[in-house]
């Protein structure tokens, strides 16, 4: 019997880029896209364990499709953020993979129970939310867990 886990529903891979216009032109020339902004509105955010003003982690994000899988591009715009930290330390590259979960609160609790730190979390208008977990110990990338708001689908 197959065991279900919180890692069962892969959603997207996210790339940190220096120049969004250049990245979009490149990936669109390869046939990836069209790209759009993520369809969620944060109502609450926590970064490094502390509440922060909503949308204070400045970045540009877009999503495009590669087959049935989403491909995210993220350009940090300075300041302290997980994306800027990655860009400063490693340059452009794969920042995280994302997984859809049924319950973001439950996912965060399970991560904490396993000793995995949550770098950033958000809750969305309409319910659900996301958290960015520090799984970079092996492989160097993070994992994002997302519970879609009611009515938001791929």
Image (cartoon, grey):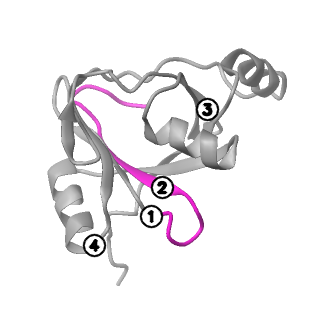
Q: Which residue is mark 4?
A: 115
Callout 3 environment at 10 Å: few (<14), some (14 to 19), or many (20+)? Answer: some
Residue at position x 58%, y 62% in the image? 140
Q: Quadrant of residue 42?
A: top left
Q: Residue 103, can we see it?
A: no
Distance Cα–Cα, label 3 vs label 2? 20 Å
Check if residue 25 falls in the magenta segment: no
Residue picked out by circle 2: 142
Magenta residue span: 136-154
How far from the left and from the top, in percent, is residue 131? Answer: 31, 46
Q: CA distance from mark 4 to mark 2?
A: 14 Å
| C-alpha separation, residue under disc 1 versus residue under disc 2 | 5 Å
Disc 4: CA contacts within 10 A as few (<14), some (14-19) or many (>=20): few
Q: Which mark is residue 135?
A: 1
Label 3 sits on residue: 65
Few, some or many residues within 10 Å of mark 1 (<14, 14–19, 20+): some
Q: Position of residue 130 (x, y in %)?
A: 30, 41
| Disc 2, SS | strand
Precedes in sequence: disc 3 or disc 2: 3
Q: Position of residue 29 (x, y in %)?
A: 84, 22
Task: Name which residue lies at 39% across and 63% down.
Answer: 7
Question: Sequence order check: which comes first, mark 1 or mark 2?
Answer: 1
Q: Quadrant of the N terminus?
A: bottom left
* In the depicted structure, whether residue 5 falls above or below residue 122: below
Residue at mark 1 to residue at mark 4: CA–CA distance: 10 Å
User: Does the residue at mark 1 contact the one at mark 2 (Cβ under 8 Å)?
Assistant: yes
């Amino acid at each position: 019997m197959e065991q279900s886990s919180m890692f069962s529903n892969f959603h997207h891979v996210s790339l940190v880029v220096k120049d969004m216009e250049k990245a979009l032109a490149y990936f669109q020339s390869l046939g990836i896209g069209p790209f759009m902004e993520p369809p969620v509105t944060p109502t609450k955010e926590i970064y490094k364990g502390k509440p922060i003003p909503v949308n204070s982690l400045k970045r540009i994000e877009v999503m495009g499709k590669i087959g049935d899988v989403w491909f995210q591009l993220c350009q940090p715009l300075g300041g302290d953020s997980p994306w800027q930290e990655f860009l400063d330390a490693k340059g452009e590259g794969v920042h995280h993979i994302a997984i859809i979960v049924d319950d973001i609160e439950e996912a965060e609790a399970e991560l904490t129970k396993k000793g995995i730190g949550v770098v950033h979390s958000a809750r969305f208008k309409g319910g659900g939310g996301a958290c960015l977990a520090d799984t970079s110990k092996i492989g160097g990338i993070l994992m994002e867990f997302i519970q879609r708001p009611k009515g938001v689908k791929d």
